[in-house]
């Protein structure tokens, strides 16, 4: 899992049936991993994640990978064409010494009554 900021959306008119009806968002990690779990397969940035909660561009979110992502999006860990899902909208983040880029910088990030990160 990682905390990131939604930086955009992906539209696809032709996609596998697993992704039909799924909103796909681009999420940029707040802090790029210096030591990826598998150095042979470093994380691609930004990550395309299925939006299960209605996130907006600019919001901080928690992204899960693998089984956790599939459970969030489909309710199970079957053979689905999905590797990442947004599983939480981050309301607050306490990280002493964190870069300023981790903080909310724009009041426009709050929309439709939801408190953004």
Image (cartoon, helix red, strand yellow):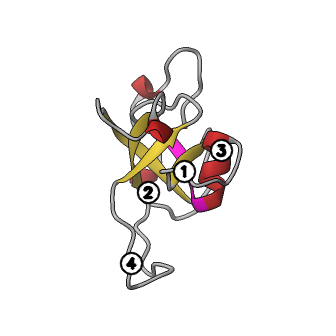
What's the distance in space between the residues labelled 1 and 3, CA to CA? Answer: 12 Å
Q: Residue at x 65, y 55 (%)?
A: 68
Residue annotated with mark 2: 30
Within 10 Å of disc 2 (Cα), the crowding (few <14, some 14-19, many 20+) is: some
Q: Is residue 75 left or right of residue 15?
A: right
Question: Sequence order check: which comes first, mark 2 or mark 3?
Answer: 2
| Residue segment shown in magenta | 59-66
Element type where label 3 sits in the image? helix
34 up-or-down from 75: above or below: below
Q: CA distance from mark 2 to mark 4?
A: 19 Å
Nearer the N terminus, badge 1 or badge 2?
2
* Pointer 4 local density, CA inside 10 Å: few below 14, some 14–19, many at least 20: few
Residue at the extreme top? 112
* Quadrant of residue 31 within the rendered picture: bottom left
Q: Earlier in the sequence, mark 2 or mark 4?
A: 2
> Count the marks: how many?
4
Q: Which residue, given by chain and number where applicable, does mark 1 sit on?
A: 80
- Separation of marks 4 and 1 at Cα, in angstroms: 20 Å
Q: Quadrant of the C terminus?
A: top right
Q: Position of residue 83 (x, y in %)?
A: 50, 56
Q: What secondary structure is marked by label 1?
A: loop
**Is residue 89 located in the magenta-colored stretch of the structure?**
no
Q: Label 4 belongs to which residue?
A: 41
Residue 59, percent across and down? Answer: 47, 37
Q: Name the outermost residue toward the right.
A: 75
Residue nearest the viewer, comparing 107 with 36: 36
* Image disc number at residue 72: 3
Between tags 2 and 3, which lies in front? 3
Q: Position of residue 115 (x, y in %)?
A: 59, 27
State which tag comes first along the sequence, 4 or 1. Answer: 4
- Asked if 35 appears above or below 13 in the picture, the reply is below
């Amino acid at each position: 899992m990682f905390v990131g900021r939604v930086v955009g959306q992906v539209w696809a008119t032709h996609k596998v049936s697993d992704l039909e009806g799924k909103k796909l968002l681009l999420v940029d990690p707040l802090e790029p991993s210096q030591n990826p779990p598998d150095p042979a397969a470093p994380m691609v940035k930004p990550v395309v994640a299925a939006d299960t909660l209605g996130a907006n561009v600019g919001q901080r979110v928690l992204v899960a990978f693998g089984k956790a992502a599939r459970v969030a999006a489909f309710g199970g860990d079957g053979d689905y064409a999905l590797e990442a899902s947004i599983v939480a909208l981050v309301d607050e983040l306490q990280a002493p010494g964190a870069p300023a880029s981790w903080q909310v910088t724009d009041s426009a990030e709050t929309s439709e009554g939801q408190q953004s990160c």
